Image (cartoon, grey):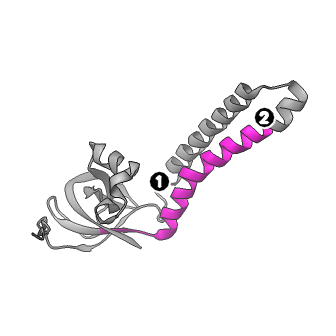
Amino acid sequence: MIEEQAVVLSENPKSIFNVNTVRVRVERKSGCQSCQLKSGCGQRVMTEMSSNKSIELDIPNTLNAKPGDHVSIAIPEKGLLNAALVVYLTPLLSMLSFAVVAEIAGRSVVGFNDAMVALFGVFGLLLGFIYAKKYGRKHEHDSCFVPEMIGHTPQMSKIIPAHNA
């Protein structure tokens, strides 16, 4: 299980798996602060530019948490890996497949040029994204994709690291 700390924002009338839900906020974390290559990394720049420093989601309220409570939530590794494969790998494989088919069949049979091959690749990429979105909607309530509350956590104040002089 992959665990994160969250703050309960509000209770929701809807339910998942016949359990009432709550909206929680999880602060986004980045490994950039501990990385030695952060000065030349594009990912660090993108993380800093992101205006949304937190993620809000609805999860089953299995602990009877109230707004303001700090809780630990977890998601199974299998669900996270499956979601990552579908979201990242499916569009990429779809794009490559369409481009290769356009290259092999299109050039020899129809006489496609490079622009048509690229266009087929983009079309494959879009189909991959559409498939990933439909997959996500179809499986959004599967137990391996829904985070669960695993415990209350004490409220932690933000710790500011001491600077060595």
Q: Nearer the viewer, residue 158 or 31?
A: 31
Residue 118, x across and y down, in percent:
68, 31
Secondary structure mostly seen in magenta is helix
Quadrant housing the C terminus: bottom left
Question: Would you identify the image quadrant in which residue 94 lies?
Answer: top right
Is 128 located above or below residue 79 in the figure? above
Marks 1 and 2: which is nearer the front? 2
Q: Secondary structure at mark 1?
A: loop
Q: Secondary structure at mark 2?
A: helix
Which residue lies at the image location 60% right of the left edge and 45% below the top edge?
91
Residue 137, x across and y down, in percent:
50, 47
Which residue lies at the image location 28% right of the left edge and 47% below the top edge?
48
Judged left or right of residue 159, residue 78 is right
- Mark 1 or mark 2, earlier in chain: 2
Any part of residue 14 in sight: no
Any part of residue 40 in sight: yes
Q: Nearer the viewer, residue 58 or 82?
A: 82
Question: Would you identify the image quadrant in which residue 69 lies?
Answer: bottom left
Residue 105, x across and y down, in percent:
85, 35
Label ID, residue 140: 1
Judged left or right of residue 90, residue 58 is left
Question: Which residue ends up furthest to the front in the rendered image?
Answer: 165
In this picture, which residue range is highlighted in magenta? 73-101
For marks 1 and 2, give the CA distance.
Answer: 34 Å
| Amino acid type, callout 2 | Ala
Which residue lies at the image location 11% right of the left edge and 66% below the top edge?
157
Q: Nearer the viewer, residue 26 or 96?
A: 96
Judged left or right of residue 139, residue 7 is left
